[in-house]
């Protein structure tokens, strides 16, 4: 049996020596800097004393630097990053073009507020998003800062355009942690626990689920029943759906279901919003996840990998819908920050010029094949489902195939053992029993292979641990 070994110490020539306390120029400017504090354990203790416990972290390690799909902690340990900062790094940590574009922008100005003195990078990014989004019609875009803010604004726009209040979201959907978006998020713990009440006029329809025996037809019947029982269709502004459930377990919306949703929206004058915050920018092998189904939504929410690590988000939509809100009704002090706009334009260019959409599809195939092979060899009847689109892929762990009971304990143990061996993994799913792949699309085949070998060893460790 494989034994756990510590992650390897740093390999990056660029950063060699950086982990020594006083060599770090950032730490040098911190007054009364205590070198002893620069260990993972010391930072855990400082964090517990200083940071609200509601902000949980998946890994008890602290970042020192990162490059493409690798990260080094403050103790100099190297990790392969399959989490990509929660699907933010399709172009990798510190993509050279993204960093260069952000630095160049910083030499001009870092903030004016688009609502006070506007700037060209905002317009250029809006133009690019309008060009990339599906739909053969005039489009306009709004830029904000976070995904939740994008979703909130999509709701505001849909309400203003339709004059209706209602929003329909789906079981297991995740749309953010602000109060309106929490109302739309379909999972209690940990997101909604103890922090309600949530805004009204939000309704939930069932998402098709193999585990729960809910077919596409059942899900559509559930939606039609919702129209009869709670959500008067002429009072519904929008149906919002992730083309691939993100936090909810990386389950794609069946394409026939997406097409039916489009028809239902057309029939009742409802806006269809595709929440592409996790699925967008090449994660699934297309610019937007919904493109796999051929359906064109009215509004799209974007964030995460749009800017390769800079906080920016947006709403793209039909021009006349986007213009429904009066001047001054949209925006925010930091919305569409110029440095983040420059980074986003560079990240999009990298996706285009480096063939990352094709790379995502190929990478997805590699992961699928390797997961199936590893599962059969070292974890028979424990890897129940391998699913997703392109490189937006997850494996689901169960106790056995007969009951298919979710095995969150095994998933947790795989994540913990992988970290010990130098691989950062993140779980997801309603039952916390799925592992999702969010590795940068720029990662080399060699690195992916190394990560998969660690995954396999971690799985072996985890099964052994739990069968003692
Ligand atoms: C599909 C989806 N929508 C919205 C959000 C919220 O984005 P943010 O965390 O930037 O507010 C997320 C974040 O994970 C997401 O995956």
Image (tube, rainbow, N blue to C red):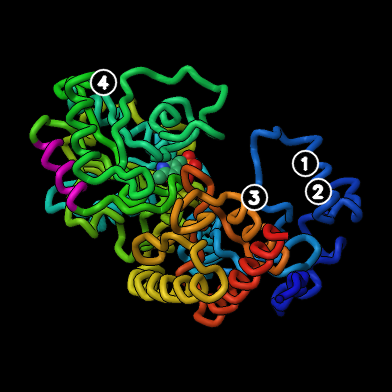
Marker disc for residue 58: 3
Chain-order first, disc 3 or disc 4: 3
What is the distance, in whole Å, between disc 3 and disc 4 at their CAs? 37 Å
Asked whether residue 201 is in view, the answer is yes
Q: Residue at x 35, y 17 (%)?
A: 200
Asked whether residue 101 is in view, the answer is no
Nearest to the eye among marks 1 and 3: give it: 3
Chain-order first, disc 2 or disc 4: 2
Dot 4 alpha-carbon crowd within 10 angstroms: few under 14, some 14 to 19, many 20 or more: some
What is the distance, in whole Å, between disc 1 and disc 3 at their CAs? 14 Å
What is the distance, in whole Å, between disc 2 and disc 4 at their CAs? 46 Å
Residue 281 in percent (x, y) is at: 37, 59
What is the distance, in whole Å, between disc 2 and disc 3 at their CAs? 15 Å
In the current view of this chain or complex, which residue is farthest to the front? 402
What element does badge 2 sit on? Answer: helix
Instruction: Determine if the magenta segment contains residue 66.
Output: no
Left or right, 91 with reference to 54: left
Vertical placement of residue 40 versus 267, above or below: below
Q: Residue at x 55, y 82 (%)?
A: 446
Quarter holding residue 232: top left
> Ligand 1: does it lie within 8 Å of the C-beta at label 2?
no
Marker disc for residue 47: 1
What element does badge 4 sit on? Answer: loop
Residue 221 in percent (x, y) is at: 19, 35
What element does badge 3 sit on? Answer: loop
């Amino acid at each position: 049996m494989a034994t756990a070994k510590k992650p390897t110490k740093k390999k990056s020539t660029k950063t060699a020596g950086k982990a020594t306390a006083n060599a770090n120029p950032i730490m040098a400017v911190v007054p009364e800097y205590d070198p002893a504090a620069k260990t993972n354990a010391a930072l855990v203790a400082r964090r517990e004393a200083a940071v609200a416990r509601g902000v949980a972290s998946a890994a008890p390690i602290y970042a020192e630097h990162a490059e493409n799909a690798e990260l080094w902690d403050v103790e100099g340990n190297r990790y392969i990053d399959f989490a990509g900062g929660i699907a933010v790094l399709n172009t990798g940590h510190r993509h050279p073009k993204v960093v260069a574009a952000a630095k160049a922008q910083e030499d001009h100005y870092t903030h004016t507020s688009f609502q006070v003195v506007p700037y060209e990078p905002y317009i250029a990014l809006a133009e690019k998003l309008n060009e990339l989004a599906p739909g053969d019609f005039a489009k306009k875009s709004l830029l904000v800062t976070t995904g939740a803010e994008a979703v909130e604004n999509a709701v505001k726009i849909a309400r203003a355009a339709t004059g209706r209040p209602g929003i329909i979201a789906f079981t297991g959907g995740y749309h953010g942690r602000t109060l309106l978006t929490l109302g739309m998020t379909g999972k209690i713990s940990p997101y909604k626990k103890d922090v309600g009440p949530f805004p009204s006029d939000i309704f939930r329809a069932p998402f098709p689920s193999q585990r729960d025996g809910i077919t596409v037809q059942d899900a559509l019947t559930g939606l039609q029943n919702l129209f009869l029982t709670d959500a008067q269709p002429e009072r519904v502004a929008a149906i919002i759906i992730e083309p691939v459930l993100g936090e909810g377990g990386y389950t794609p919306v069946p394409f026939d279901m997406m097409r039916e949703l489009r028809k239902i929206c057309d029939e009742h004058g409802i806006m269809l919003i595709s929440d592409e915050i996790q699925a967008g920018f090449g994660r699934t092998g297309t610019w937007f996840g919904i493109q796999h189904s051929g359906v064109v939504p009215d509004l799209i929410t974007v964030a995460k990998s749009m800017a390769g690590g800079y906080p920016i988000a947006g709403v793209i939509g039909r021009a006349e819908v986007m213009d429904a809100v009066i001047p001054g009704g949209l925006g925010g002090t930091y919305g569409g920050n110029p440095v983040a706009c420059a980074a986003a334009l560079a990240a999009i260019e990298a996706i285009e010029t480096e063939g990352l959409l094709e790379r995502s599809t190929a990478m997805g195939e590699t992961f699928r094949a390797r997961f199936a092979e590893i599962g059969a060899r070292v974890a028979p009847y424990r890897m129940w489902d391998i699913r997703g689109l392109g490189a937006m892929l997850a494996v689901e762990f169960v106790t056995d195939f007969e009951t298919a009971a979710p095995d969150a304990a095994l998933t947790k143990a795989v994540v913990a053992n992988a970290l010990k061996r130098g691989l950062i993994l993140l779980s997801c799913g309603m039952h916390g029993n799925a592992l999702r792949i969010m590795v940068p699309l720029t990662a080399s085949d060699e690195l992916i292979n190394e990560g998969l070998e660690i995954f396999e060893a971690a799985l072996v460790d985890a099964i052994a641990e739990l069968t003692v």
